[in-house]
Each structure stands twice: as C-alpha cells, then as structure tokens.
Image: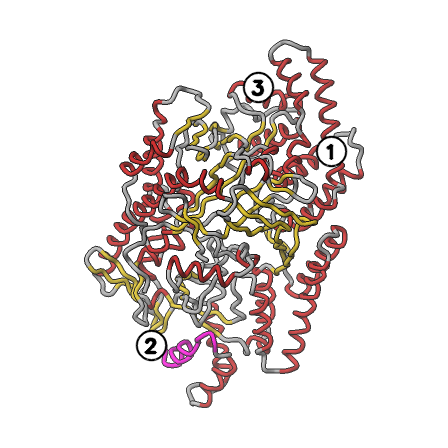
Amino acid sequence: MSHLVPLGDTGWSVWRDVVLRTAGFPAAGLDRFAAPDCAAVADALLAGDTGAEVFDKTLREAFAESSAVAGELAADPLLREAVTWQNPDMLIALDGLLRTDPQVRNVRRRKRELSLLRYWQRYCGKAETIGFFGPVCWGTFDTTRPGVHTVPGAALVHRRRVYFEAWALIAKADRLADDLAVRRWWAPALQPHLTVAGRELRWPLHPPIALTPVEALVLGACDGRTPAVELAQRLCDAGDVHSADDVYLLLDRWVERGQLSWGANLPIAPDAELVLEARIAAIGDEPVRAATAAEFGRLRAARDEVAASAGDPDRLGAALAALNAEFTAVTGRPATRHSGQMYAARTVCYEETARDLEFRIGSAVIDALAEPLAVVLRTARWFTGEVAARCGEVFTELHEELAADGPVRLADLWLLAQGTLVSPDGPIGRAGATLTARWAELFGLADLPEGQPELRLRAADLTDRVRELFPATRPGWPSARLHNPDVQLCAASPEAVERGDFLLVLGELHPASVAFDSAVLSPFHPDPAALRADLDADLGPVRLRVLWPDSFPRRTTRTTYALTGPADRQLGIDTAHGADVDRLVPATAVLVERTGDTLTAVFPDGARWPLMEVFATLLGSLLLDAFKLLGAAAYTPRITIDRLVVARRTWRTTAGACGLGGHPDETSRYLAVRRWRAETGLPERVFVKVGTEIKPCYVDLTGPLYAQSLCAMVDAALRTGPDVPVVVSELLPAPAEAWVPDAQGRGYVSELRLQITDPAEHLGALR
C-alpha cells in the first residue's frame, strides 16, 4: 500500500500516516477560571450602569470561586504528576494552596494561584508533545470512510518511556573521564569538523596548524574508534614515543586547546544511555570497569524507580528527588538546568508517552482540506525556490571570494554564510517579506474595510492568481519537496465530522521540513522502519545529517533525528558531542565546486551533493520563522479559504500602548482588562503572546485570575521597554469544538501534524 494519499486533484499528496498531538487535560478545563457574570458587572460599571459596591462584591465572589478552584486543582493527582515531571519546585506552590485558607488571599497565595494558572492553561489549551500531559498518537488517513473514527482506551496513555537527558549523561561521562584509569580506555577523536593532512591540522577560516611529527602521528590516529591505551601502546611499540604517559599528556594538551575530544563522545539523543553503557563495557581493566558499571547502575536504578512511579505523584516526586541526589553525588553538579522556567527547564530525565487512542481520518476531511491547502502549498514551493535563489547568490559570492585563494572548503563557506542566513535582512528574511507582501496582494488586504471580522475566499477563484504571484514549478532543493502543516479540526465530536459539521484551521506550516523524522514522534509509530522506507521513497536512500554544534539553541535530546538509514552521512561543522565516526565527514574535508551556476559539495569519497541540500537542515530550522502569510498589521481579519482557516483574527499592540501595565491592585487590573477588551473589540477567549514570553498563553478575559496573569506579563514586559509587542489571536477551535474524546467522553485540544509531498522533484538528484 502506498504511503501517499492524493490531496484531491491537486497533484499534492499527504502521507497516510498522521500524528495527532493533544493536550493532556480536557479542553473544558479552560473554563474553570472564567467568570462571565463578573465580566458583565464590570462592563456595566465602566458604562456607568451600576455602582462600585455591586462590582466590588461580585469581584470578591469571583476571586473566592477561583481560589476554591485553585485549591481543588492543586490536589488533583494528574496535575501534580504533570507539574512533578516539568518543575518539581512548583509542588511547593501547590502544597501552599492546600495548606492555606482560600478566603485569605494574601500576596503569597495570589502568586501561587497565578503560577498554577499558567501551568493549567497550558495543560488544557496547548497541543504539545510534553510528556504524559501532551501524549503522541499515530493514526492514518482512511479514504474508505467519510468521517473520523476514534476508539479511546481506558487510560490517557498506554505507553510510557523515561529517558535520561543527554546533558546529564554527558556530565556523568565527563566526571568518569576525570579518572585516567577510565579515560584511557576511551577513544580520542578530533573535533568533528577538523582534519589532519600530513603534518597539518586543518580548521575553518584559519591557516592550517603545523604539527610536529609526533603530533601528526598521534592526532592522525585519533579516529574515535581506537582507545587511547591501544593508541599509546602502538606508538610505543613503534618507537615513536617514549611512554604512554607522553601520549596522554599530548592528548590532554590538544583537548585543552579545544581541537580534540577525549571522553565517552555521547550523542545528544535518547540513546545516549546505550552509548555510555557500551563505553563502560569497553573498559579493559576489570576492577575499574566493574566499579564504573556499578556506579552507573545505581544511577540507572534510580531512573528505573522514576519510571516505575508514573501515575503516583507522591512516589514520583520522591523518586525524582532520589535520582537528583544520586546524580549530584556522582557528578558534583546540580540536577537541573534553567530551573523553574516553564519551557526551558532541563531535568536529569524526562518522560515520553503515547496516547491510548486509535483514530482514522476519513475522506470528508481530506476533500475539505485539499484545494485550500494546495493554495498554501504552492506558495511554500515558491518560497523554497525564492530562498534557494537568494541563498545561491550569497553562496556564489562567498565562493568567488574564497576561490581566489584556492580550492573552497565547505567549512569556510559554511561559517561565513551563517551570519547572513540568520540576519533579518538576509536572504531568508527578504524571501519571507516578499512572501508576506504577495499574500497581502493575493488577499487584497489593503482594500478591506476597517475592522472586517472575516475574509471568505474560494480556492477555485485563487488558483490563477496564485500561479501568477508564486510562479514555481519545483522546490528549491531536493528535500524541500516535503512540508509539514499543523491542522486543527473544529468539531464537537467525531459524529459531527461524519455529518460534515466541521471547520479546519491551519496552524503553522513547516516548509521544507521532515517532522516525522523525530526522536519524539517516530519511536511511537507502529513501524518506524516503514516510516524510513517511505522517506526514502520520497527523497532517496541517503540523508545528510548535520551534527549540530553544542551551542545550537534548538539542539536537545528530544528534537534530534530518529530515522537513520545505513547509507546516511553526518556532516561535522563545529565543535560537538556525539559524532558517529562511521558516518562522519568533517566539513574541512569537503570541497565546494562551481559548474556554471551550480555549486556542488564534493565529499572525500567522490559523493556529490547540491550545496543547497547540504544547508537543508539548517534552512529547515530557519524557514519556519520566515514563512508568515500575514504581516504585522494592527489588525488582520480571519481569512478562510473554502473550509480552511488560514489565518485567525489577530490584534497587535505593545506593552506600553495596551494600557494593562502599572496598575496597583487586582480591581484596577481587572477593570483595565475589561476596558481594553471593549475598546479593541476582542473576543472573550484569546491567546496572547507577549514579546518577552516564549509561548502564547490562553486568556479568558472574563476571569479575574486570568486578568491578573495578563497584567503581570505586561508589567514584566514593561521592564524591558514599552515597545515590547503584544499579539492577540482568537481562540479557534473553541473548547466545545475539541473532538478528540477520552473514555469518559471529554474532549481534548488537538492538532494533526501532516507530512505533505510535492509532486514536483528538484532536478538536482542526491547521489
């Protein structure tokens, strides 16, 4: 059976496999802190239709109700487990809510309630892949039936896996490597972007480093496979060095210079634990190996107790504390990084889960999605071509400059190109600005009446104009034929979809991206090998993987590649952990050649890759931020093509202009929020993205506690400056349109992550 399902008659295809990302708590939980009656009284006060006494009484009652709800949620075992996984320190706030009288809302209790709200709105309102409160679920498109078929299991999740964070294992391995008795059994290796040629060490953008004969012998033998003890013995037997200690001292010297690594070389990936296990097993000194394995075994046993404690928040908390204590004991380092941050915290271990749900999406959804999504996909194809053209100009110019001094190494061109690629006015930023301007022309946004709530369009009416504005016949590079849109299905239930009572909403579209090749998603697929085979069918059997440097901001244990094939290559571009020495190709060993207008990366074995494909992984991480259909106008309407919403209603202001900052008490903050809502015509339920926050937050503008949270975010933003942007978008789908059910019939916020294949192929085949 083909892995592709036609998107109607558009020529595009969607992968039969589809990921459903869901929240971990029912969508109805978003209404727990709503207070519509209080909002009505506040609005009446602002209009002069009621007195302050009535409002004060109503507001006190609303706060009392929200305090009672906060206390109830603080005792919820599921919420406590979610918080325990994400930020165990938050349990102090939850316990504080349970110990104190909800009627006594002092400063400390108010802060605790706001902290709880921030977690609660995320757990109920965001379709995120974050442990058991955001489980992964794989399903399929099924064209033999029209509607959506769901079979929820008895529990929220049916599979759990607990992994060590790679940074924690690297810390453990570094501590072990402090002991030469251990380290001498591990293989030293050049940093992955460096090469030794004769008596020279080659590194990017610098003349080669001259090596002594011994240095050339030692560094040339540091292949990442040969243990230092074997390397030293070989050199001693050949008479090249006097003693093994001389070799170890030389290795340490180059490690200090940052050009050699000598340790466990663990990958930033979930399998780092297995790699460290193998490294320990390779220790040839039996007493040292046994002691090291026993120490690592204690850490693993503590992790296993964490895994066994899932479902019991109190036991889980104790197990995590014990793991943290063991980690600190064996590494001397704190057991958390970025502690307390909602989105950035990194603990010693983390959990991944699969939702206990079977689902299939029928033909009615595909038929409704096909034509309007094809409009967006055609512009994504154009976008990759535009990026390729603009980046090609940059690469050609750099190549010409470098070629004046001889053969051009990929390492040099790569480093010189980085600043230009990430610059807002660089080739990607300019391509994104052109995309947005052409979308505005396509929609006729400049001619819309002020404040128009929705613009409804037909895909059939846009087809010719899209071809004129976005003339592209093929993607910009070979792997750019894959795209990943996130689509939300607005429906009250699977039965409503069967009746045709639904709407589709396009979230983000990840252009030139392969979302299914993910350490978070693919391990829960019923047949990951089949996923890789499907990827090969679309892109060919060889993938070029960039080994991200340690400083790369989006490099985490969970976001690495997962679908690795036997012929894949790994490109070393900078200092990094975890090089796969059997696949590694240092960028200093790759040349960039020009034939006519084409730049090609030539690998040491003769393999040739289009230069744009070499940059494809980096571009995929940058294109998402540039692929914006709408510009930053003060207001944009909802835009719907057929039955697909491609843009939600959006309002833009700043921290200084919104009027929500600087209010001294809860009453004035709540009234400021109600005044702001009335003046701008906002719906009651929205998502708000403050520029100083990492992610948008759900806000019910009727809720007094939500109002306090929103004003607190604005106050924090004002400490940065009055021009911090505040972006508001309508809530769509609404909680009542959360069609994903559990066994109790409760609905959950969700989104479908699709993988789309362009029917057009790039002419530069991978070879």
Asked if residue 115 lies in the magenta stretch, the reply is no
- Cα distance in 3D space between marks 2 and 1: 71 Å
Is the residue marked by circle 3 packed among few (<14), some (14-19), or many (20+) residues within 10 Å?
some
Above or below, 734 against 528 in this view is above
Q: Which residue is mark 3?
A: 675
- Cα distance in 3D space between marks 3 and 1: 26 Å
Is the residue marked by circle 2 packed among few (<14), some (14-19), or many (20+) residues within 10 Å?
some
What is the span of residues highlighted in magenta in the rendered image? 211-225
Q: Nearer the viewer, mark 3 or mark 2?
A: 3
Residue beneath the point at 60% across and 74% down: 280
Q: Quadrant of residue 120?
A: top right
Q: Which residue is mark 2?
A: 199
Is the residue marked by circle 1 packed among few (<14), some (14-19), or many (20+) residues within 10 Å?
some
Above or below, 759 against 496 in this view is below
Residue beneath the point at 41% across and 76% down: 219
Asked if residue 212 lies in the magenta stretch, the reply is yes
- Cα distance in 3D space between marks 3 and 2: 73 Å
100 vs 523, nearest the viewer: 523
Residue beneath the point at 76% across and 36% down: 71
Q: Is residue 27 visible?
A: yes
Colour mapping used in the image: secondary structure
What percent of the width, then of the height, locates residue 529? 50, 63
Which residue is at the far front?
144
